[in-house]
Image (cartoon, rainbow, N blue to C red):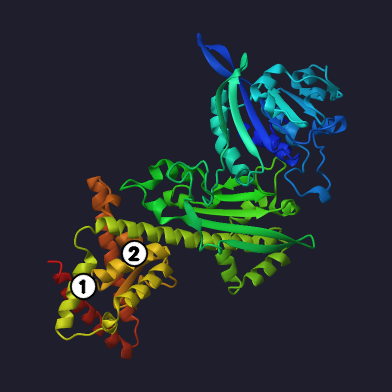
Amino acid sequence: MRDNGYKNAAYAIAELMDNSIQAGATTVQLLCADREAQVEQRARKRLHQVAVLDNGSGMDADTLQIALQFGNGTHLNPEQQTGMGRFGMGLPSASISQCQRVDVWSWTDGVESALHSYIDLPEINAGRLRHLPEPQQEPLPSVWRTAAGKDAFGTSGTLVVWSNVDRVLWRTSRALIDNSEELIGRMYRYWINDGRVSILLKSFLYEEPDLILHERRAKPNDPLYLMSNTSCPAPFDTKPMFRPFPNEGENEVALTVRFRNQDHPVKVKFSIATEEARDSGGGQSTGSLPFGQHAGRNLGVSVVRAGRELELDPAWATSYEPRERWWGVEIAFEPGLDELFGVSNNKQSARNLAEAAKIDTGALIKEHGGSITAARAALRDEEDPIEPLLEIVHRVQTNIKQMRNMIQTQAEGRRRRVRHAEATVEAQATDAVRKRQQEGHRGRSDADEDRPAAERKADVAEQLEHLGHSPELAKELAAETIDKGLKYRMEVASLEGGAFFSVQPRGGVLLVTLNTDHPAYSLLLGARDPKDLPEDPDKLKERLLSAQSGLEMMLFAWARYEDEQPSDQRRIAQNIRYDWGRMAEAFLSSRL
């Protein structure tokens, strides 16, 4: 029973806090007591005992007896499965996973009437404790009353104390609090943010309980970064770092899942980093800044059950890609779907959802004629238990892909703004166009240059926003393009189909968009920022040779395209090649 799968002490502590919140507590304290010990002939502080105190409804003798029994509890009835509790394992299993003795005091009519019981593993092993002790009225130890403060004890409440903490990973109370704070703040972010519960973290010396070493309140840790006043470092501690995706009020998808002949609501929310967050580095990578590192620790999809996070599953993200930290997803459901989602009895994961996430829903739907209904029907025929989760997973995967594309577009735009402090390729290409215009050559887009600048900017901004830029940045880039008199703007995005690039005339400007999904992009243009080029001469040579080979392969592909044309179309393809070659000569000459 001690090896029951709690990831660490912070998750075990969260089980106790679940009980506190389930009991209606508005204040919960995590109290960590150090004692000085001789370690390698030096006096050092070592974690001695851990306690969780709340002002919840407390327990009478019968309830306290049940709470310390394995596999028993007060929320086992299906009709009562509306809160955090359910499995009847939390208090005893979480406690003995970290310590060898757990004591519980609980009171319903003043702390002086507190009832006490305990589990002691050495006594069980020695045969001295063959059944749970009957709860007896017993005063709370003075050490906890002093450390918690007299105002912490209401008319009702519960105190759980761990002793002989032999399996807690962290050796000091400070380390335990530091490593638990972000997790606790993330698990109970909605409760803390709404003011429904306040969680206080304290450490002190056991022999001097009135001397508090560290004390702070847990702040919400929102992996979607849509909350204000959170644990995120400045400047995003008091304001959101992300914005709703795709737009305000449109980032929440409400789904209805049919399970066991009943309908259950599931909500999925999405968020993406603001331009301010991505541009706050002042030339430095924002991922290396404190708020970027904070986002890196909140990588993945947040799975929330009954308003409390079960886990932040990193399997949905590409862990080695630093840009993954700039999106957020949350899947929220109620306990009635525990079996479908595969919620573990220690409430640390949703196994079935994690398995469903491994399915390539796009390929599965394509296999069934592009219909998710048909794909679900096929899984239903196979009696696949994951079938009801398919639409949820598909929505999440689709939106993550869109957010990744937008984040890449933002990054490319940022690179170009930094890189193009001098004359841009667009400006050089514009010069080549102006010369052709003077020679009497006209293009379809040229007529729009006579329209009012405001209209042209609006047209360009609309397309830039469609490609993934935020509305604010799209307007800024469009204004820059029109005000500088540029004829071209280079963008990047994920494009449907097999084209390497697209051309869209907007407001007298030719928007050329490179397809990031095309193999030629990474091969030929993946290092458009000089900082991305390898410093090692041999690796740089290898990169250049690879780009040269890629260019040659593109030419071979065109040659084959001409070769496969019907005889009446081959001359047209050849003429296109001739015309493009002459145009390229004129444009490349403008760089000399």
Q: At 41% across and 51% down in the image, what residue appears?
A: 277
Q: Please, is residue 395 above or below residue 198 in the view?
A: below
The image quarter containing residue 570 is: bottom left
Q: Quadrant of the C terminus?
A: bottom left
- Nearest to N terminus: mark 1 or mark 2: 1
Pinpoint residue 63: horizontal percent, then vertical percent: 84, 34
Q: Residues within 10 Å of mark 1 (few under 14, many from 20)?
A: many
Q: Residue 189 appears at what percent x and percent y?
A: 60, 44
Is 320 placed above or below 439 here? above
Q: Which residue is mark 2?
A: 476
Residue at the far top: name it: 41
Q: What residue would you read off at disc 1? A: 430
- The amino acid type, in three-letter code, at marker 1 is Thr
Q: Is residue 46 above or below residue 439?
A: above
Looking at the rendered image, the quarter that the N terminus falls into is top right
> Amino acid under label 2?
Glu
586 horizontally vs 9: left or right: left
Q: Residue at x 59, y 69 (%)?
A: 365
In percent of width and height, residue 161 lies at 70, 24
Nearest to the eye among marks 1 and 2: give it. Answer: 2
Residue at 56%, 28% (x, y): give it. Answer: 215
In the rendering, at what x and y percent does residue 194 appear?
Answer: 63, 47
Secondary structure type for disc 1? helix
Residue at image location 24% in from the left, 59% down from the top: 420
